[in-house]
Image (cartoon, rainbow, N blue to C red):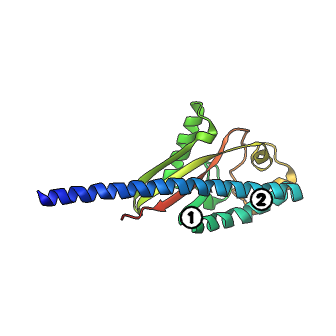
Amino acid sequence: MRIILSILIFLLSSQAAISDEFDTFSRQGQQAIKEFATALKASLTTAMQSGGSVEAITVCNSVAPTLSSELSKKYGMRIARTSLKVRNPDNAPDEWELGVLNHFEQRKKNGEYLNKLTFKTIINNEQGLQMRMMKAIATDKICLICHGTSISEPTQAVLDKYYPNDQATGYKLGDIRGAFTVQKILNNK
């Protein structure tokens, strides 16, 4: 009986530790996404003001991966962007992300506001237990310059140069452009 009680106490304390770690991950993940979105938007806005869409593409090509890497190190988790229609093949969604992106599309069709489209969970896969979170990215007016249906020839030429297999066009205002994605291996305590 004592062994069973010890096992039960151990399991309950492990669950509490996992729950605490997931709460911390959720808060830090939200902060990391906010920081990523704010910094990237500021860089793109500055680039648009100084050199137009051509400069913004250059910034997106160099600044976004650097920002992702820096924030991943800062927060101790993988932070990136993905989409159903990627521009950079390095940002292609994994199976879990693909499922969440499709779920976001369905939630949007059901009338849910884009700024509410988030999802977080703990999954168990070949890498072990992982905490995962995604937040949808809405297509706003400035996005349409490089991601819309009417892209200028100079902009398209730069897109073709950097992204020869670009799929990230044809969006309309209010579409789901993609999502921020965050993941961290769960530290069992």
Q: Name the residue at 56% across, 30% down.
A: 110
| Mark 2 burial class by Cα count in 10 Å: few <14, some 14-19, many 20+ | some
**48 w.r.t. 142: above or below:** below
* Res 100 seen here: yes
* Labelled pair 2, 1 in contact (Cβ < 8 Å): no
- In the rendered image, which residue does mark 1 sit on? 75
SS class, disc 2: helix
Q: Amino acid at mark 2?
A: Ser
SS class, disc 1: helix
> Foreground: 29 or 142?
29
Count the marks: 2
**Left or right of 134: which side holds 185?**
left
Q: Amino acid at mark 1?
A: Tyr
**Left or right of 69: which side holds 48?**
right
Q: Check residue 47 in the rendering and tell me which mark sits there, or answer none.
A: none
Residue 90 lies in what quarter of the image?
Answer: bottom right
Q: Residue furthest top?
A: 111
In primary-sequence order, the first of circles 2 and 1 is 2
> Foreground: 173 or 168?
173
**139 w.r.t. 164: above or below:** above
C-alpha distance separating marks 2 and 1: 21 Å
Q: Horizontal and vertical percent for residue 128?
A: 39, 62
> Foreground: 150 or 53?
53
Q: Horizontal and vertical percent for residue 25?
A: 49, 57
- In the rendered image, which residue does mark 2 sit on? 43
For the N terminus, the image quarter is: bottom left
